[in-house]
Image (cartoon, rainbow, N blue to C red):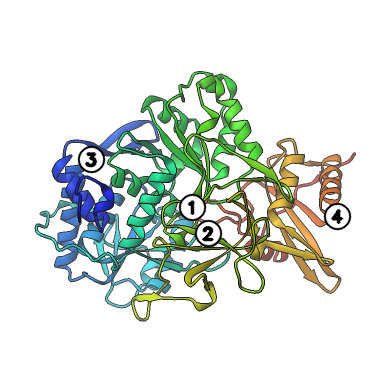
Amino acid sequence: MTDPRHPRSFDTIVDLVAWRGAGQGDRPALSFLDRGEEITAQDSYVTLLTQARSVAAGLRAAGLTGRPVLLCLPSGLDFVRCFLGCLLAQVVVAPAPGLETRRGLDRVVSMAGDFRPAAVIAPDRAPPAALAAALPPGCLHLAAADLLAGPPAADLPSPGADDIAFVQYTSGSLGTPRGVVVTHRNIMANQAMIATGFGHDESLVGVNWLPLHHDMGLCGSILQTLYIGGQCHVMSPLSFLQRPLRWLRAMDSLAGTTSGGPNFGFELCLRQVNLDEAQRLDLSRWRVAFCGAEPIRPQVLRDFAARFAPAGFDPSALHPCYGLAEATLFVTSGAPGTGMHSRMLSTESVSCGRPVGEGRVRILAPDGTSAPEGTNGEVVIGGPHVSPGFWDGATAAARPDPAREVELERSRYLRTGDIGTLVGGDLHILGRSRDMIILRGTKIHAEDVEATVMAGSAGDVTAAAAFALTDDTGDRLAVVCETALPAIPAELRRHLSGRIGETHGILPQPLVFVRAGAIPRSANGKLRRSACREALLANRLGSPKPETPA
């Protein structure tokens, strides 16, 4: 540590939070919005630190220092208090969904088998039977309320910069979730990048509806707030999904300056917030509206800016970015206040900006070298924010994956699995390598087909998944569309099929319409195309929508 007045002077986020608790104790740090509307709990920096130290004391007393702990709490202040307590106690914590839904429970069960926790922190002392059966023998069951009620620990030793801070399980959009090991060095490097890329300072007022067990909610909102010394208001994801207007009203009433989420969050606002409701809002203080974690559709962001222009929303606040759990979170973004920029590549593509600080991005050529600008290829990333490897439950340590690593320019790079290109130094993401559809020798990005469907459906299709099917008749393009329509007009099917054929040179066989929500998604809303393919083949997508005659 050289200059305790600057966040970059600290080796770990817990040292920084401890300093803020001592020097900025009464400054508001976090609040919780019940139903996304009313502040019902609030922590100053000193209160948050005290609560975290109580959790740390209980964990250390249980002999859990250095051991894996699964954190299964819903999004809220107790989640943050317990997460920081885990870092202070130097346990290896894996953030997980709450156990109140079947979907969350199923995900935690899949995580537990890989993570092999020594303890589980949950709302209750007794875990659900399905989770208990997946836990190793001797696993402790700790109630969050009991930990928070204990006396705070004093004189806690600081973790090392290269010690494991937490294990972030991937969304599972490409298959079984894997635990990405994140060190304290990774956290601090990435937080510095976010602060620079987003132009943050202590005036930051965030509003977050993203799940706190996911990297965008945890690292992009909570840890960034604590890093920069700002304030963040948290609502549950369900409060947003039930009524997206709650997010925008919170940005208005709480004078929010930074908030965002995946593309679908902005799209949901367009579908469910009407012009009259928009005109009653004041969004003029919104400086950073970040968008990432899934393919970004430029028309959605343009429409969002237009819909909420009467509320004072500034299009220059639109802030597309690119990141992934293996990079802790952030990889690239545009400069603050410059808005969204796009180019026509295979389709219209949004610029995700460029790396900041010590971050590095290259495009990998087929021969394993760095590809020249303008060439399509796999995106590879390097820098101090890149994870050292994946969690190995058998050894309770990070295990590098040689298949995911490559050496370029005498430096280590991680293969992301994303296909992209650099144009004018800016990164454009074209799709996932596993989502590349190769038919009749032609390469088609699944996202491009899906964008064609969405652009041509006039709002009748709310989501689409494209993938290849292979059987005895050969390779085919399959497209599954979600819709709220009770029956599908024959003209809509013909129109979309023709539009796909005209744009991509191949007709979909089949083109299936299903109810809204039928397409499998990961925890943060990403389409799970391989799971959708399996569900289609197994007739698990539900009954196809009937078709009305022309």
| Res 547 → quadrant | top right
Q: Is residue 469 above or below residue 510?
A: below
Q: Secondary structure at mark 2?
A: strand
User: In this view of the protein, can residue 209 be seen by the observer?
Assistant: no
Residue 174 sits above or below residue 342 on the image = below
Q: Please tell me whether mark 4 sits on a helix, a strand or a loop.
A: loop
Viewer-proximal residue among 407 and 204: 407
The amino acid pointed to by label 2 is Val
Q: Check if mark 4's residue and mark 3's residue have beta carbons within 8 Å.
A: no
Residue toward you, 291 or 135 = 291
**Quadrant location, the C terminus:** top right
Residue 505 marker:
4
* Side (left or right) of 122 relative to 369: left
Which residue corresponds to the image point at 34% horizontal and 36% vertical from the top-left? Answer: 204
Residue type (three-letter) at the residue carrying disc 3: Asp
Mark pair 1, 4: CA separation:
35 Å
Q: Which residue is mark 3?
A: 43
Residues at circles 3 and 1 in contact by the CB criterion of under 8 Å: no
C-alpha separation, residue under disc 4 versus residue under disc 2:
32 Å
Which one is in front in this view, the residue at disc 4 or the one at disc 3?
4
Instruction: Report crowding for label 3: few under 14, some 14 to 19, many 20 or more residues within 10 A (C-alpha).
Output: many
Report the amino acid beneath label 4. Answer: Gly
Q: Residue at x 54, y 41 (%)?
A: 265
Q: Nearer the viewer, mark 1 or mark 4?
A: 1
Residue farthest to the bottom? Answer: 394
Residue that numbered label 1 is attached to: 355
Find residue 342 and report its image quarter. top right
Residue visible at 25% across and 60% down in the picture: 87
